[in-house]
Amino acid sequence: MLKKLLLCASFLVGVYSADACAQSIVKQKITKEVPLINGHEGTRKETAKTENASANTKSHLDLNDNEVWWGYFNGNYKTNDPTYMLKMGFGAKITYGCGIKLKANNNEFNMGKGKTIEGIRFVIPDLKHIEDVKIWMTTQLSDNKDMSGCNICVQDIDKSKLIQALNSTPDNFINEIRFDTPYTIGDEDVYVGYSFRVTQVDDTFDETPVVIDKNPDNILSLDGANFWKYDNEKWYEDKCGEVLTMQVLMSGENIKKNSVDISDSFYDIPIEKNTTVKLPLTLTTYGKEGLKSFKYVITNNGKKIDEQTVTLEKPVEGVGGKYTYGFPLNFGSDHGVYPTQIEITEVNGFENESSKNKSLGDAIVVDKPATRKVFIEDYTSTQASGYAFGYVNKIKLKEIYGDNVVIVSAHYGKDDPMPAKEYSAYIKEIGMLYFPNTDIDRTYREIYPYIGTYDGEYLIYSYVDDFDKAKEQMSVATVDVSGKLSEDNNTVDVEAKVKFEFSGEKNNYALFYVLTEDGMQNDSWVQENDMYEFDGYGLEEEEPLFEPFIKASEKMTGLVYDDVIVASQGAITGIEGSISPTINIDEIQTNKISFNLSDYPIIQDKKKLNAYAVLIDTNSKKVINSCQCKVLDSTPTGISNKVADGNIAELERYTVDGRKIQKPVKGINIIKYSNGKVVKTVR
């Protein structure tokens, strides 16, 4: 049996981690202490003083009717075990400051001006080396280590009254603390947070003591959701996609009780005629009572087609909770475009208090589902030490799925000799963080090649699970493509034919085109390779295709690269006007483009090119369908593309293990012809 998988990070270029952004921050000059500022707006709410500054600290505070816990983080911790919490830190004996910003005006969550900040709650993984815990409020962030300079309040907390997550119970690991002096928000934004000092670093809990979250299901907004500092340094607003797992206790008039938001729109949902499809949409609670039940109404062009009340088996508690429900859609037997509205009219038996209670979009009813081909963008680099995962993944996908998979390999990196200019711009556009990597239909993003999203202990081929999920998605159109090299070998003319399975007006479809080259190689090219680290683990017995990499060194040469993108047009947004917005079910739309090969100097052999046409939804950016073909040579040499009858072309040739080849080799050759036949020959 294969040994446990080594960390995937050892095979990546530009690996992202929770503290990647923190490590990239340049240290600022230490600033002088800022005197206490008294000229802020807003009001302190006077309360009786307590003898102990931490008397208001509890694991669970009892709330008044007009109070609610609120934050950009919704309070749904993945676990109470700090080992599995997402944490950040600097691994040093320093003082941390952590906070969020509450907007006074134009506050979309109704938690701004006029609302009163009563308390705070947060998690500390391990208290053994934590001292000087403070909570604070201010309209101007203080750069001072002890938070002097906060112009509303700084409140010292008795460590003995605090709770740590380590060795805690699921219902008793969060610190909930009332401010001695609550504060009502005026015209200025307010920062609320906590600070503490690490006195010693013995383990991971001391190294990374700040708990954050990056699960989209737990995040209401990223704007203002994560401010941090250390010692006397400047504050930094973290915009890497995580929020501080902290909430504030808010009070005031008009605290909503039964309020649920729904996303204001949804992307096209394809439906086969006379069938029901469930459209998953996420509901977010903004009322104190959370979500126990809701009533929805579905309309098409103002005509009610469904009305139901849904009762949840497990209620969603509090503000910021999320619940995904599949709304059933069925429009009968006529194909076409059906403008649809889904409205949440009631929450928990009361009128929905939210103004964001409607979601709009189009249902596309098709006569029959189009033949689907899954489009794989394989992102790789000669600097990616895990290159073998993408290489083997491509071979296996072609072997298993044949013509149902369409694969292009996008090379990237300043030292990579094969990057295509426009596609490099696209890679920057999507913010790809590590290589190797893949996107499936631009729908399932950043799926690691070969391994897929499998997170078990063993290195097995799990990518097929992700592929099958994409393959099951319905397509509303088929795509065919042909490509031909000009007689002077300077131009490739590409023609795409698109046939939709419905009629109607839709202006959000477009084509983009790609040329790839097979058999690219150069003895000077060096491929990074960390697969040699698997030598002795038996991986090559489980997957023989890895053996050449396992038995190689850290630097490999002499490799042959297939499916390499050498040219593209419209890869980012599609080509404007390539698809007519007036769609007729019986009409084939044709689009033609040309590639001037002199514009693409990375091409090595013009006789080894492939052409691709990809149909995308310009709203969702997702791939609808795709197709590829071999670029036919006007003056063929080498392997003849013609068979005996003079009309059938050889499209592709493979070895028995699925490796694409350009000319016959000894042993079994698998040949695919333009008439759909697959023939095995032996030389």
Image (spheres, rainbow, N blue to C red):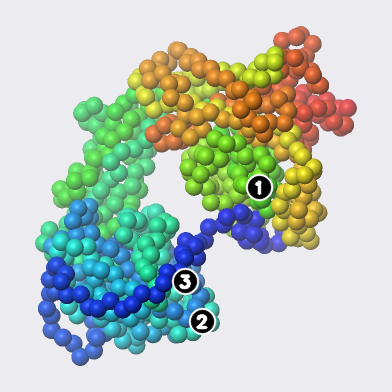
Quarter of the image with the C terminus in it: top right
Q: Earlier in the sequence, mark 2 or mark 3?
A: 3
Residue 617 falls in which quadrant of the image? top left
Three-letter code, disc 1: Asp
Q: Position of residue 397 (x, y in %)?
A: 65, 38
Q: Please, is residue 189 above or below residue 592 in the view?
A: below
Q: Do the residues labelled 3 and 1 touch (CB within 8 Å)?
A: no
Is residue 234 toward the left or the right of residue 47 in the image? right
Q: Please, is residue 455 above or below residue 644 in the view?
A: below
| Alpha carbon distance from label 3 to label 1 | 32 Å
**Dot label at residue 549:** none
Which residue is located at x 23 percent, y 59 percent? 103
Q: Can residue 343 be seen in this view?
A: yes
User: Mark 3 = which residue?
Assistant: 89
User: Mark 1 = which residue?
Assistant: 415
Mark 2 Cα-neighbour bin, 10 Å: few <14, some 14–19, many ≥20: some
Is residue 316 toward the left or the right of residue 460 in the image? left
- Circle count: 3
* Towards the viewer: 325 or 251: 251
